[in-house]
């Protein structure tokens, strides 16, 4: 029984290599080989990037006898990568699998299901951990005169760290399950939790960067201080160096943590496994619906659809949060911004502000996956008594509504700090409006030309679709044009207002062309999709 469950778990982990998440169909041999080759190349690039970070540390610390400190830094880095990478999938692996009902109908104890799924989380964390751990050991072998002990201890330490990573990832997935148990708005909980997690990660990253800088200034003193203050970290480093008692103690502690986690969480696993998170009992009551104009009703529908899809919201609308935050940061760091821009000509500052804000606003590509995300319910939109042009226009308006106010606020804060004249400031706001309109229409046009209505996972449409990728990179390319076209005209002695006016005219021309295409051929494509 356990062997069959383990085989099933391994097949699930490798399913991406043999089955496409876009269509749900089995890949051909050539497609599977190409996907595996691409995965191997990406993993190699990640390992090389970690190696470029580990080698300078090894060259600095190992000759000074701080082998243990080097391994502590690299172990913490590998553990962080493993926890972050596996934490986002642990909740789905443990609680939201599609075969929950089938497994519970079989004579299999829930504890066995939990143990096998924890094994899947363990393997996932181990794979991500090795991406950082293998380059660390190789760099140590290049810098140390006698690396034999560390090479022998590398595999046991990796297995122990993967166990710790599994415990942390399982606890995080368990916390998400408990939150969703009482949450009525699961999407909101997911979005807020993810943003808080990213904020904590960024704060931890800044703290680690400052610690590494202090280490580079005086490695010996920093190592002595760390050894006195953090004895567990010293033990962790000694285990990686090859100290046998420390290694055995680390393995024992990791095994104890895994066993304790399994014993404590296995009992209530069945209750959470069968729980429908955030789903209250439906109560239907007759009530009179308020009559709304078609545009308002369609816009409300698009907003509710966006709010119900956390993946769409986090990946395609993150600039709606970043732009106001950056505006506040500009006001907070006003003196630093003035000092940074003091070397630039005053007439080029509006172009710089406009180009930077456009580059951030281009990270919003809400319209690109909006058509594909309709999926099997697209016929509902097509059957409504509204014109296809009106449906497409509302999708564009949604991106304008969520992007343009933040872009104006961020640009306004920057222009107030830099004391940009009002005339140029109004032109900057007009250029931003034309740019956001253009990127919204471009994303929708790409979504109509490259639709995927038969997806299996939302990630296939939001993250891995050609329309989303082209919309994002195309938006950045347009932002580069918004920045460099006026600056190039300034080099030819064109007045600043005329340079910005030329940029605005070019954007409006592209806007009108795309608007005409969407109202004619784009609407016809939308009506013919099935």
Image (spheres, grey):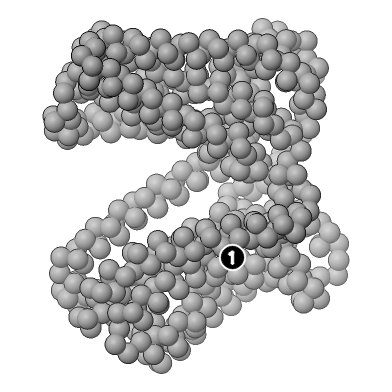
Crowding at dot 1, Cα within 10 Å, few <14 / some 14-19 / many 20+, comes out as many
At 34% from the left and 51% from the top, the residue drawn is 203
Q: Secondary structure at mark 1?
A: helix
Q: Residue at x 33, y 32 (%)?
A: 326
Work out whether 332 lies above or below 441.
Answer: below
Outermost right residue: 106
The residue that appears at 45% across and 88% down in the rendered structure is 152
Q: Farthest residue in the bottom direction?
A: 244
Q: Which residue appears at 23% of the width and 16% of the height?
A: 492
Q: Is residue 445 above or below residue 147?
A: above
Query: Taking 72 as reference, is 179 left or right?
Result: right
**In this view of the protein, which residue sits in the foreground, 492 or 499?**
492
482 left or right, relative to 444? left
Query: Picture coordinates of residue 157 (x, y %)?
Result: 46, 80
In the image, residue 434 lies at what x, y percent?
A: 44, 15
**Circle 1 sits on which residue?**
124
Q: Position of residue 314 (x, y in %)?
A: 52, 38
């Amino acid at each position: 029984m356990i062997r069959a469950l383990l085989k099933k778990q391994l097949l699930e982990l490798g399913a991406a290599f043999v089955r496409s998440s876009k269509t749900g169909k089995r890949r051909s041999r050539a497609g599977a080989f190409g996907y595996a080759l691409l995965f191997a190349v990406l993993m190699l690039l990640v390992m090389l990037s970690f190696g470029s970070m580990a080698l300078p540390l090894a060259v600095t610390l190992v000759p000074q006898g701080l082998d243990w400190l080097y391994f502590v830094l690299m172990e913490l880095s590998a553990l962080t990568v493993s926890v972050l990478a596996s934490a986002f999938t642990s909740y789905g692996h443990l609680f939201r699998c599609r075969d929950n009902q089938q497994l519970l109908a079989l004579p299999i104890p829930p504890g066995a299901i939990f143990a096998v799924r924890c094994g899947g989380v363990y393997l996932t964390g181990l794979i991500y951990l090795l991406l950082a751990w293998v380059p660390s050991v190789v760099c140590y072998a290049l810098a140390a005169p006698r690396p034999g002990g560390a090479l022998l201890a590398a595999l046991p330490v990796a297995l122990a760290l993967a166990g710790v990573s599994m415990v942390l990832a399982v606890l995080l997935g368990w916390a998400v399950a408990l939150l969703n148990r009482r949450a009525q708005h699961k999407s909101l909980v997911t979005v807020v939790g993810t943003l808080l997690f990213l904020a904590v990660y960024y704060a931890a990253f800044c703290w680690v960067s400052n610690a590494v800088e202090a280490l580079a200034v005086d490695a010996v003193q920093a190592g002595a201080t760390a050894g006195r203050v953090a004895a567990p970290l010293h033990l962790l480093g000694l285990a990686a160096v090859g100290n046998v008692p420390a290694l055995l103690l680390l393995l024992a502690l990791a095994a104890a943590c895994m066993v304790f986690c399994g014993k404590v969480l296995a009992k209530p696993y069945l209750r959470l496994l069968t729980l429908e998170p955030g789903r209250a009992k439906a109560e239907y009551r007759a009530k009179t619906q308020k009559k709304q104009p078609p545009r308002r009703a369609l816009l409300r529908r698009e907003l509710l659809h966006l709010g119900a899809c956390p993946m769409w919201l986090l990946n395609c609308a993150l600039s709606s949060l970043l732009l106001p935050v950056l505006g506040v940061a500009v006001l907070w760091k006003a003196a630093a911004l003035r000092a940074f821009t003091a070397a630039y000509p005053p007439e080029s500052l509006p172009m710089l502000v406009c180009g930077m804000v456009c580059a951030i606003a281009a990270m919003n590509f809400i319209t690109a996956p909006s058509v594909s995300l309709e999926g099997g319910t697209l016929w509902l939109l097509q059957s409504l008594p509204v014109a296809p042009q009106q449906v497409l226009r509302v999708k564009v308006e949604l991106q304008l509504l969520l992007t343009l106010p933040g872009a104006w606020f961020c640009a306004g804060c920057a222009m107030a700090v830099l004391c940009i004249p009002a005339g140029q400031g109004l032109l900057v706001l007009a250029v931003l409006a034309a740019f956001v309109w253009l990127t919204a229409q471009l994303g929708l046009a790409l979504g109509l030309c490259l639709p995927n209505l038969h997806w299996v996972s939302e990630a296939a449409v939001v993250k891995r679709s050609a329309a989303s990728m082209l919309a994002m990179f195309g938006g950045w390319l347009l932002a580069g044009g918004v920045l460099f076209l006026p600056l190039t005209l300034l080099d030819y002695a064109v007045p600043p207002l005329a340079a910005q006016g030329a940029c605005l005219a070019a954007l409006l021309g592209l806007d009108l062309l795309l608007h005409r295409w969407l109202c004619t051929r784009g609407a016809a494509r939308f009506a013919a999709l099935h």
